[in-house]
Image (tube, rainbow, N blue to C red):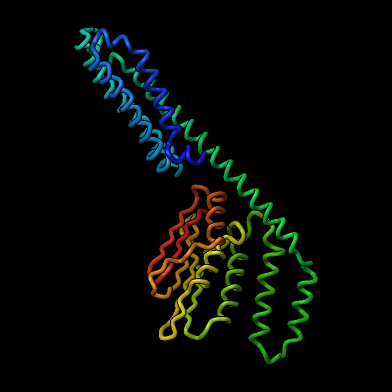
Amino acid sequence: MRFFWKYKLDHIIFWSITIVFYAYVTTDLLDKAGAYQYWLNIFIRNGLLMLVCYINIYYLFPNFFKKNKYVLYSLFLFSCSLLYTALENMHDRQLYGYVLNNIYKRSFFSNTFYNFSIAIFYLGFTMALMLSKNWYKQHLLLQKIQVENLETELRYLKAQINPHFLFNSLNTIYFQIDKNNTEARTSLHKFSELLRYQLYECNEEQIAIEKEIEYLKSYIDLQRLRKQKNYNICFETDEDVCNFSVAPLLLISFVENAFKHVSSYTDKVNDIQVGLHRQNNYLLFDVVNSKNNNHLPVQESIGLKNVKRRLELLYANKHELCIQNKSSSYSVHLKLQVS
């Protein structure tokens, strides 16, 4: 099936059927106008239909309809229909009015209603086919994610430890650590907070952004304890990043990736910058880390692949993800519609 979609075999089949059918119903032109006019008519008519249909599918629909600009989309779609009608009217006038010498067809507007109807029909039909294909691909994606979730759940159940036992054990270890060893106590406390968040607070489809920020802060604080002094780790969040919800554990994979691939220079500072900002109804999330200057690209982790799939599923047409993998830095910019 991937081969079928990859090489646009559905497009080839559709237009082949369309052209063959039109060639069959207009065979009388071979005797009346000759082979040249017959094939020219087929080429012009179907070429114009392809033009307006693909303008709609690949430009108008993603840039206007998907972005909720319905009025502009309707105006441009109407303009495409008029464009096809005007160009086809010109050809019909030449073919039927002058080549076939039908004086009633010499008016520019003689076939306007028919040609406009054809344009509307093909625009609507090709749009229905495209939406059906997108629905089918989305359905396959949902099935794949459901299977992955089931497999993950099975692995989790096999390896599950009683949470109460786990936290009791962590508390026991915490109080066994010498009180003067503040770093070890702080690390264990941060780890306990992270674990509690994952086990108890991430069971809903949406979670308050304030909780997600606290989770990110705890994770970054824990990483600070592990890193040496020549690391500049900055976490910034604007005051207006509040009072909305996001999918839980959506942002952490990008932060984990930054700490995993951050540079390890000993003669200069290694940087990790994390920022959350709000712009109208969008959350802007940025993560930048320095890399060892070896010109080797950062390999995409399973966590990044998974979060990309979650974004496609949960925030389809509501997010923009830009990743720049440069020789000395790696940056992520996520723009997420939140309300």
Q: Check the image and report above or below for 212 versus 20.
A: below
Q: Which is more toward the observer, 79 or 250?
A: 250
Residue depicted at 43% across the width and 36% down the height = 8
Whole-percent x and y of residue 111? 31, 15
Seen from this angle, which residue lies furthest bottom?
180
Residue depicted at 39% across the width and 74% down the height = 293
Residue 155 visible:
yes
Q: Check the image and report above or below for 73 versus 25.
A: below
Q: Is residue 275 left or right of residue 204?
A: left
Residue 93 visible:
no
Whole-percent x and y of residue 24? 37, 14
Residue depicted at 72% across the width and 63% down the height = 200
Q: Check the image and report above or below for 92 versus 262.
A: above
**Residue 268 occupies quadrant:** bottom left
Q: Is residue 83 left or right of residue 216?
A: left
How many discs mark residues in the rendered view?
A: 0
Residue depicted at 41% across the width and 70% down the height = 329
Q: Which is more toward the observer, 41 or 295?
A: 295
Whole-percent x and y of residue 302? 56, 60
Q: Is residue 69 left or right of residue 91?
A: right
Whole-percent x and y of residue 204? 68, 56
Q: Is residue 213 left or right of residue 185?
A: left
Q: Which is more toward the observer, 244 or 331?
A: 331
